[in-house]
Image (cartoon, grey):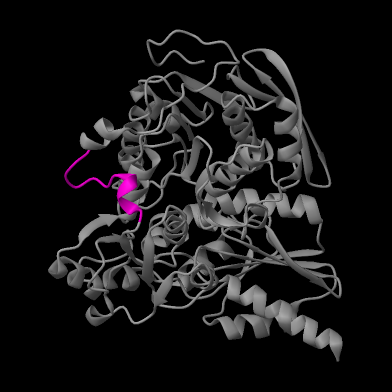
Amino acid sequence: MVTLTSSQPREDTRRIPQRESAGASDLAATAGDNIAPEDFRGRRVHFIGIGGSGMCGLAQMLKQMGANVSGSDKTQSAATDKLVALGVKVGYQQTAESFPQDAEYVVYSAAIRPDHPELCSAQCAGARIFKYAQTLGRVMQIKNGIAIAGTHGKSTTTSMVAYILLRAGIDPSYIIGASSRQLNGSAHGGTGKYFVAEACEYDRSFLNLHPRLAAVLNVEPDHLDYYHDLRDITQAFGQFIAQVEPGGVIITNGENAACMEAARAARAPVETYGLTGSPDWLATEIQSDHGKISYTVSYQGRFLGRLALCIPGRHNIGNSMVAAAIARHCEIPWEVIVSAIEEFSGADRRSELLGQINGITVLDDYAHHPTEIRSTLSGLRELYQPRRLICVFQPHQHSRTRCLMDEFAASFSDADLVIVPDIYFARDTEADRQAVHAQNLVNRIVANGRLSRYIPTFPAVVAALRAELQSGDLVVSMGAGPVWEITHELVCRLQEHCSH
């Protein structure tokens, strides 16, 4: 345990202090603009941008809590289809007239602009309006909150924690920024005492959370359309860490300097994890058998046992060690942790295998930050050992691409070919759009010694891949936008060719 707080050292079996259910006096203290969780039962709650990864999960949870939920989004998706199947009314017009005038509460995502017609209509109707993160934070307060933060790796780690708790026979609530087949989606309103949530740093939304147990996986430059620089990001993570209740626990990356700087703000005890030095949670004796990784875990010098991963990539050593540490603090038996981690197959769009046709392997991944890209490609090469590794990378946001251009260009060292379609336009200004083009990234990748091509449209990328791919090749789509459409379409086309 690093000396960052005045708290006394704890035994390795110490559990998180339990929170009793919120009583009337607790709720009375949060009057005003806060939402008491009990207020949702039987109430009409409308979500603007309901198809978003966190929004759809929260909508599902509130539906399970007895709310009358409706919502809107720009387009129909698998997420909105699932909500409709659960009895949620979803519209796709997003006009002022489409806002339900009887909605008492309105929840909107950080991507919704202040002049959005439904949001303006909600204001005129006198509805109580909250950001997604505000609502999430209030719901968390009636549970023992577990929040996973970091620039990347959050969805995988949060999913893993939720899965371990489920396997332990605990019925946790959880909201994750990605779906998981093993979790039957991205959210669940459980009857157990724990609420596991992915804590997003964009818009400082994670500052709405006051968890009992928190993890910070990494702090790196990102969301530079919102934050000024790494120092600004680190300060925000420090604020998040400071909000962890003094009776709780913080687990952070001892090998990340910004994590350690942010942890100086902690009021709760801080535990570190890593592969080198003397962290509280130490991974040693790392072995890899065709990409399948196993390692030994020690806690404060005490041997706990070995963990074996089903998911590829050395970066998942840290993710799984954090999940194991959190589960240990929730008093989950070690043998349950070992079994659950070994069974965990990952979140959707995280090195997700879409098909293997005629010797061609097709995958999809959400990676959209340089560190994620580098780690994921390295893991895929080690696991599959392909003849060629072809990456289709759709940059997410012009501002992110411009600010991290050098880092992106250097992150494809394990790819034999990088195909780059047009940049996904999200939250950027027109000035951002004009400042950088996908061809600029291609040029920089080539300057770094890798083969790269700019192919602007998805149909053109699919056509190029069909002409390019041979037996033994692996192709992976990467990005936070709809780039997955390319590899899903590619699998269909390859299967059609196979059947003829």
In the figure, 115 relative to 37: above or below? below
- Residue under the point 39% across and 37% down: 142
Q: Give the residues drawn in magenta, as a range.
A: 30-41
**Horizontal placement of 119 versus 262: left or right?**
left
In the figure, 22 relative to 124: above or below? above
In the figure, 165 relative to 487: above or below? above
User: Residue 60, percent across and down?
Assistant: 47, 59
**Horizontal placement of 246 versus 377: left or right?**
left
**Horizontal placement of 188 versus 462: left or right?**
left
- Residue under the point 41% across and 74% down: 90
| Res 43 → quadrant | bottom left
- Residue under the point 45% across and 71% down: 423
Front-most of residues 213 and 291: 213
The number of numbered discs placed on residues in the rendered structure image is 0
- As for residue 34 lying within the magenta part, the answer is yes
Front-most of residues 341 and 122: 122
User: Residue 171, percent across and down?
Assistant: 58, 41
In the figure, 364 relative to 3: above or below? below
Q: In terms of secondary structure, what is the magenta stretch mainly?
A: loop
| Res 36 → quadrant | top left
Q: Is residue 241 visible?
A: yes
Front-most of residues 256 and 293: 293
Q: Is residue 49 visible?
A: no
User: Residue 133, percent across and down?
Assistant: 34, 50
User: Residue 231, percent across and down?
Assistant: 32, 37
Q: Residue furthest bottom?
A: 500
- Residue under the point 40% across and 66% down: 50
